[in-house]
Image (spheres, rainbow, N blue to C red):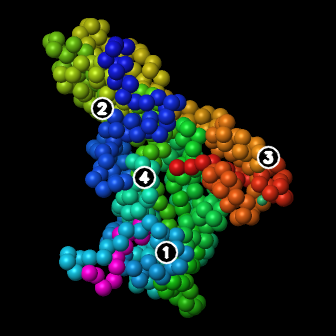
Amino acid sequence: MGKKNKQFVEKVTAMEEDFAQWYTDVVKQADLVDYGSVRGTMIIRPYGYAIWENIRDILDGKIKETGHQNMYFPLFIPESLLQKEKDHIEGFAPEVAWVTHGGDEELQERLVVRPTSEVLFAEHYSKIIHSYRDLPKLYNQWSNVVRWEKTTRPFLRSLEFLWQEGHTCHATDEDAAEETNKMLDVYAQVCEDYLAIPVVRGQKTEKEKFAGAKYTLTIESLMHDGKALQSGTSHHLGTGFAEGFGIRFTDEQGELKPVHQTSWGITTRLIGALIMVHGDNRGLVVPPRIAPTQVMIVPIAQHKEGVLDKGYQLKEQIATFARVDIDASDKMPGWKFNEYEMKGVPLRLEVGPKDIEKNQVVLVRRDTGDKEFVSMDELSMKIPALLEEIQTNLFNKAKELREEKTSVAKTFDEFKQLLEEKPGFIKAMWCGDVGCEEKIKEETSATSRCIPFDQETVHDKCVYCGEEADKLVYWAKAY
Ligand SMILES: [Zn+2]
């Protein structure tokens, strides 16, 4: 490691020193975002956007495979429409952005810039659903939404973010419940199989559920600093919106009934999770299945005859089985090594005059730093195998870290001590009383993350009040 290398790394604060600053440094140095001119907004740069496009394409494929269709709604919601579902407006009112003027003229009715589109879908559904033959309706929208947050951080919390929101209508409560589960599974698959982020699946408490939902299912993941991040939610909306908006259908017996609805979403927050689960003090680490570039070719002594030609030839060859690029700029190889480590490219391929003589290349893994010489004839075997190995290794490492940072608390004293000394998920029993949940949040700022589907009995008393309890809850401080 030369002097240059060291200086480069110093641009990133060590995560042990200041995790928040480390995050901000990585986001900037890996060139994922720039700050927008309005406080709390972000400009997603090409590299950040390419990661989002990969997440989007994978999820979009799964949304379509499960029978959904994409459509697109307007950005604006009339105030009167938002008022139609009481819990929903109460939940969102504090953070909506209002449009009051069109040009010079004051609008007769204020408009909301969508914070989510339940009411837009609901109004539309009330017009197009009449009979059981119209059901189910399985729609999804890819869009931006605006929530006027007080404190913001790129990807994690920004005034405007990108997401998809699925909105479906069903004839029965059971069908809607099945849909809610199905989409949570799809989200868990995307997180675990592609982003290499292990998740805990469960249900939100009444206090933490989506405004206007019957219940909310969630996948929760744990970041490097021991804070949790809600990574995707799927809501069973029951018939609340259907009743507010008159979304009714005539069933096979000729009876008029409200539809049962769901909604579900994941957002650009997942990029924040990716950074905080896999990143290290050298920058970003991108799992191969999500990486815009899986292999970066860095020619060594590229001014020497035949080196660049070989580099381009390798690129063409590798492009048939992996996403590959070459940096043929006149920057020093050391600079390039740092740059693509910072960007988290899974594999670096070095090729110079001596390698060409020996018909070999050097492959360097981003996750472990391991280096090996590989014959040029074996690349089509070796590279895909290495990419798979990296993918698996990242998932396993993340899972180990989560397990290391997951503890059990039986008493509130233990709970508080763990939060101080060993931040992470705390598994503790809860009596079901919202009062206990609120007190825990007040006194520790940890929140209930979910009631996991995988229940176990770690104790028989509520961690706060000491009364009998049979629900296991995951608690944590969260983003
Ligand atoms: Zn209690």
* Quarter of the image where one finds residue 461: bottom right
Residue 80: say if magenta. Answer: no
Q: Which residue is mark 3?
A: 410
User: Helix, strand, or loop for circle 3?
Assistant: loop
N-terminal label among 3 and 4: 4
N-terminal label among 2 and 4: 4
N-terminal label among 1 and 3: 1
The boundaries of the magenta stretch are 106-117
Describe residue 24's horizontal placement relative to residue 259 as left or right: left
Q: Amino acid at mark 2?
A: Val
Viewer-nearest of labels 2 and 4? Answer: 4
CA gap, disc 1 and disc 4: 22 Å
Viewer-nearest of labels 3 and 4? Answer: 4
Is the stretch drawn in magenta largely helix, strand or loop?
A: strand
Tell me residue 47's x, y (percent).
Answer: 31, 41
CA gap, disc 3 and disc 4: 34 Å
Q: Which mark is residue 89?
A: 1
